[in-house]
Amino acid sequence: MLSQSLMDAGRFFFSRGWVPATSSNFSVRLDEERALLTVSGRHKGKLTEEDFLRVAIDSGFSLDVGKRPSAETLLHTQIYVREPDVGCVLHTHSMPATVLSRLTEGVLLLEGYELAKAFPGVDSHEASLSIPVFANDQDIPRLAAAVDAWINRHGLPVGYLIEGHGLYTWGATVDDAVRHVEALEFMLECELWLRRVG
Amino acid sequence: MLSQSLMDAGRFFFSRGWVPATSSNFSVRLDEERALLTVSGRHKGKLTEEDFLRVAIDSGFSLDVGKRPSAETLLHTQIYVREPDVGCVLHTHSMPATVLSRLTEGVLLLEGYELAKAFPGVDSHEASLSIPVFANDQDIPRLAAAVDAWINRHGLPVGYLIEGHGLYTWGATVDDAVRHVEALEFMLECELWLRRVG
Amino acid sequence: MLSQSLMDAGRFFFSRGWVPATSSNFSVRLDEERALLTVSGRHKGKLTEEDFLRVAIDSGFSLDVGKRPSAETLLHTQIYVREPDVGCVLHTHSMPATVLSRLTEGVLLLEGYELAKAFPGVDSHEASLSIPVFANDQDIPRLAAAVDAWINRHGLPVGYLIEGHGLYTWGATVDDAVRHVEALEFMLECELWLRRVG
Amino acid sequence: MLSQSLMDAGRFFFSRGWVPATSSNFSVRLDEERALLTVSGRHKGKLTEEDFLRVAIDSGFSLDVGKRPSAETLLHTQIYVREPDVGCVLHTHSMPATVLSRLTEGVLLLEGYELAKAFPGVDSHEASLSIPVFANDQDIPRLAAAVDAWINRHGLPVGYLIEGHGLYTWGATVDDAVRHVEALEFMLECELWLRRVG
């Protein structure tokens, strides 16, 4: 069950400290028109069945009476709109993502990592993953437009960072997206240490 | 049950290493006149029903025969006295709180964090959270007076630090206070890293 | 059961963050001619019985129809070929291994560690463990040849690092190999900190 | 049961990464003449009933046929001999203890920590805890003599470090000793960070 796999993902992320204090949000595509999204304000490490709602992909509007979707719904639905193969979008809020996003302007380059091969189409550690860093913005439509503009120009990245706010990534399935979170969070942690020791 | 939620909070904090070696203390408001507080000297990560006692909010005196309240009871009751909406006060003792409180004089500014929105009334990452840092003091009434004086002057902060001693924060409910601990401990950890890499 | 001990090892390594996102791989010698290896692409922290296959030690070829061995099979079988006493080879992919392997050319020297005594034949902290660091290479036969050449010249190390890719180590039994992973990962973590504080 | 409390202590320390790879050792006083000690070579995070043996406090000799005590038995028994009130001696092997012991000559001073109050007789954060650092030595009687000489000169510390080897501490009961480990490991971790940020 899709909500169950998001609940499990949340528990795993929580055990790592990646979803502190009602931050973060998760979604999964239900069909061409609808997605299941975490309700705003719930602790993503302790999700239950009541903590999800369905939204319309084209508008981001709630389809479940009385449930308020995450303020960041557009950041999920915009990916489902533009990428028909994406089935799950995950936003985590770890310390490395938060810190590195504040220290990096424009694009964070992840190079020389064997773990880059966790992403489809990447078959060598010589690959360079470009992770765009967007300024944080409480005006979500404006932030989503900045993300759209970047992707139109540079193609779909494996994920992106929002300054002081964390990581967005996705995959064809929940399993794939969770793997991408784990790979990116790992590489971000390595980057932090490379900057301090190297 | 209120003691149960404090026991659960303690287990969570213990799993993160935030309540080492009988440090820390927790309380919850029972009514206008009484609070439930952790007994001095018990390990806050392994609390049982016997590890709580009731105190009078106005005096800090124990209402349970034979049980000694935390030496820091006044730091809890002073918040209940001044803030009728506060229902829970939590003191944790993490490494980031301990280290940063020793490296910071006066006030620690937390800026640029999306997670600032975990606090009521904060709706933007552009908010700046001022966390006062008080010198440690075994004379608790004197320390409590310093806290009172600061709040009278600057208004209620989201929490404060005691040098080499940790973090105090609060919330309307135990859930809120736990979320505030998690958010502050996260931002303190980010600050430590920002100082070392940035 | 040998697969069970590899599954348990994987769970332990996962709890430490040493086997992120389908990285890593484990094997155990079945007899002179065959080894049991983890299937490519499975998450090594959540292995089940279906995630193993048997390979021929001399060729690295799969003996189980429909199951694809790890791309790195040769890095396991080459050790079984040259070292008859080795019964288990483990590859983990931790942050310290990944970062240090990128900061070190040639050989990483671990000196002054009491924990060096975790390895057979080492009875003093004055021992110096030489951990070769090989450049990463998607051409595994070529990488295996580089490992063979180094061992021919310098003798069998306690383990080796692949740049940006992690650690390989081994032991007579699964227990021994797991102990060697734990000891090396510990010393690598110490090295990271020594470089940043010392 | 005393062995049970040592097994539980081992599990807790293991969960923190403080007892890697068959390092560390624990003991508890049985009576004036005998102590219970962990057997050499067992993983201290996964102890069972079979992993303990009794030793004579005055000689350090095993009282259980076929079981070999830790090479470091003297470091335990010497404390029981000199301090009649000590009922438990614990040796852990954490990264902070290992790293700091290599960066510090003579004595590590822990000052300004509220958590110093975890130790009997300390009632203020203004206390300064002097933690001697001894050079590592495979000749345990010689190392024990160095410890004895220091204590004769300076009095009993709250614990001591052995270079590249870890921490020894003790308490009246297992609970006390575990609390002392937790407090010291916490302060050592703080020290590491203070040296890197402050």
Image: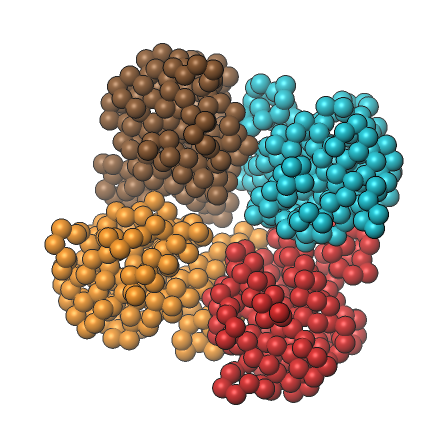
Chain colours: A orange, B brown, C red, D cyan
Residue C138 versus residue B71 in the image, above or below = below
Find residue A107 and report its horizontal and vertical position in percent. 38, 62
Q: Nearer the viewer, residue B182 or B88?
A: B88
Find residue D119 and report its horizontal and vertical position in percent. 62, 25
Find residue A43 and report its horizontal and vertical position in percent. 31, 48
Q: Is residue C89 left or right of residue C149?
A: left
Residue at (31% x, 19% y) in the render: B34
Q: Nearer the viewer, residue C198 or B76?
A: B76
Residue at (79% x, 74% y) in the render: C153
Write down the quadrant of residue D169 in the picture. top right
Whether residue A156 is visible: yes
Whether residue D150 is visible: no
Find residue A32 and report its horizontal and vertical position in percent. 19, 73
Residue B156 versus residue D3 in the image, above or below = above
Residue at (72% x, 81% y) in the render: C32
Q: Nearer the viewer, residue A82 or D44?
A: D44
Residue at (73% x, 72% y) in the render: C86
Q: Is residue D161 left or right of residue D11?
A: right
**In which quadrant of the rendered image does the N terminus of chain B lie?**
top left
Residue D108 versus residue A95 in the image, above or below = above
Write down the quadrant of residue D136 in the picture. top right
Query: Number of callouts in the render?
Result: 0
